[in-house]
Image (spheres, rainbow, N blue to C red):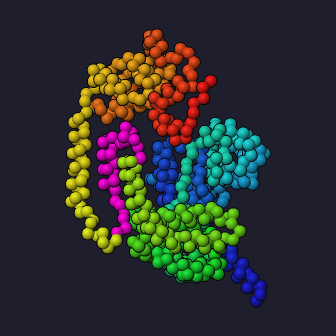
Amino acid sequence: MIHDLILRHHFIMEGFLVSARKYRPLRWSDVIGQEHITLTLKNSLIKSQVAHAFLFTGPRGIGKTTCARILARVLNCEKPTSDWEPCNSCLTCKAFQENNSFNIFELDAASNNSVEDIRSLVEQVRYQPQYGKFKIYIIDEVHMLSSAAFNAFLKTLEEPPPYAKFILATTEKNKILPTILSRCQVYDFRRISVKDIIQQLQIICKNESIEANTDALYLIAQKSDGAMRDALSIFDRIRSFAGKSISYKDVLENLNILDAEYYFKFYDAFLSEDLSRIYLLFDEVIRLGFEIEILLEGLATHARNLLICKSPELIQLFEGAESFKEKYLNQSGNCSKSLLLSCLDMINETEVNLSRSRNKRLHTEILFAKICHLQRSSIHTLTETKSDTIEKRVTEKKISKPINEQLSERDMTKETLELASKPVHVKLSSSAIGGIPKLSSLESLKDKIQNQEKERLDKLIELNQDSFQIYWQELITAQRSKTLQDYMKNTRIEVKENTVLIYTGSNLGLESIRAELRIEDEIKKVFKGEKLFVKVEIDSELNSKEEIVKPKSLLTERQKYELMLNTYPILDELQKTLQLKIVED
C-alpha cells in the first residue's frame, strides 16, 4: 500500500507542468505584447529576406526565447500557413516539441561560455542539416560568453554557410561586443503592459476553471514588473495557496502587499490634519510586518495616482485596480495639486535619507507630522507672501532707485500688466470687505494701461543720423563726470538702419562709454524699433584728439579729490560729516 502511495505521488509530481511552460506560445499570434517584433519577423519570412543572425534583447521573461523557437520552427516547417505560422503538426515541428530535433540546437551561454564550447559549435556548423532546410542555433544569455569566445565566434557569425542561422538572446545588450552587434539584426523587446498580462491570466483562469478577482490579477500583474513568466510563476504560487478561487485578500496575504485601503486612510488623515490617527495607522502597518520603505513607496504611488486623477486628459496613465478608480477620483477632489506635489517631494527626500538614519521610525514620523500640517502652512504662506511681495515690489519701484535710474514707463506698464493678470490672495478683515474691487474695474484698468502703452509708442521718434546726434549732445550735457563728457565729445557717430556705431579714440574711452552709459537699453525708450543695436569701437584717427582727457602730469591729492568730487558729489557731504582732511604730499 505504501508503495502504491509513493508511485501515485510520483505520478502527480511528474504530471504537473508549470503555467510558464504549459502556456508557452507556439505561434506568432500567441505572443503577448511584442507585436512590433512578430510583425517584422513575419514580413521578413513572407518576403524571403531572413537574416543569418539575430539578436533578441530585453528584460527577463518577456518572450525572447519563445520568439526564437517559433522562428526556428517556421524556418524548418514543412507546411507553414499562408501568414507564416508553424503548422506544429509536421515531422520537424513535432521533433522540436519532443526535443528530438537534429537541426535546431539550443545552447546556454551561461554554462557553455568557453572558447572550447564555441569552437565545438563552429565545428558543427560545417555539416549540412540532416533533415530540413536550415541548421538553427539558439544561444541564450549570450552576454555570458568570454571575450575570447566572442572573438572565436566572429568569423562564423559574419559569413556562415547558407543553411546556418543564429539567434542570440540576452538581457544585457551593453555587455556584448560591438563587433558582434554589427553582425546581427537587433530586436529590442519591451516589457509587457499590466493590461496584457491581466488578459492572459484571465484566459488561463478560464482554461483551468479558476475563479479570480480582477483586482487580484491586477496585483499579480503589477508585482511581475512587465515579465509574463514572473506573472505566471506568481499565479501558480497563489493557485497553490487559494485553490480554485483566487481573491484580492489571498494575493495580499501571499505576496505580502499592503492593502490600498491603508493609503486612502493615510491621505484622509493628512487632509483632516489628524496626526494621532496617522501615528496609529503607522504603528498598525509596522505591527503587520511591513518595511517602512514599502509604506513610503506606496504613499508616493498613491499621491501620484491622485495627481493623475485631477487631470481628465491624464486618466489613461492611472496605475491601480479599476475598482479603486472611483475612490481615487473622489479623494483627489479634496487635494490640491500643490499639496500632492509637496507630498511627493517630501516622501522622496525621506526615502533617500532613510538609509542613513539610525531611527527610521522617528524619521518617518517627522515626515508625517510635516505633511499633516502642510496644507495649513502652505495656505498661510501663500496669502501672506503674495500680498507682501507685491507691495514690496511696487514700493521698490517707487523709492529705491534714483530719478534717472527709475523704471521707464514701458517697463512699469509691463510690470503693472503682469500684476493685474496674476491672481492675488489677500487676508481681509470684516471691515475691509466693502472695498473689494469689482471685475469691471479691473477690466477698465487693463484698458487704461493698454491705452497708455499705445500713447508711449506714438511718442517714439525715428532713428537716423540727425536725431541720434541731437540725443547724443543732450546725453553729454546730462553727465556729471567731466572725464566721461570729454570721452563722449571725442567720438564719431554713424547710424546704419537699426544699428548705431560709436567710434572713440582709446580703450579707456571705449570701456567708460560701455560701462557707464548702457546706451542700448536707453535708446529703446526714445527711438522706434523692436531691435536696436549699439556698437562701440576704436578709431585710431581719434587718438590725436585724446590728449584732452590724458593727464600731462601727476595729479596732487587735492586735484584727485576734486576729480572724484565731480563724479561723486556726495563725497563733499561725507567729508564734512566725518571731518576728513586732505593730506598734501
Residue 198, horizontal then vertical, whole percent: 50, 69
Work out whether 479 lies above or below 224.
above
Q: Quadrant of the C terminus?
A: top right
Q: Is residue 416 magenta?
A: yes
Q: Is residue 111 left or right of residue 337?
A: right
Residue 58, horizontal then vertical, whole percent: 59, 53
Residues 134 and 330: in front is: 330
Residue 532 in sight in this render: yes
Q: Is residue 64 magenta?
A: no
Which range is magenta? 400-428
Q: Quadrant of the N terminus?
A: bottom right
Work out whether 231 lies above or below 106.
below
Residues 519 and 186: in front is: 519
Residue 228 in sight in this render: no
Residues 30 and 427: in front is: 427
Residue 111, horizontal then vertical, whole percent: 75, 54
Work out whether 291 lies above or below 405.
below
Q: Is residue 353 left or right of residue 402?
A: right
**Residue drawn at point x = 53 percent, y = 62 percent:** 345
Q: On the image, which quarter does residue 443 sit in?
A: bottom left
**Residue drawn at point x = 55 percent, y = 48 percent:** 187
**Residue drawn at point x = 55 percent, y = 39 percent:** 579
**Residue drawn at point x = 48 percent, y = 68 percent:** 377
Q: How many marks?
A: 0
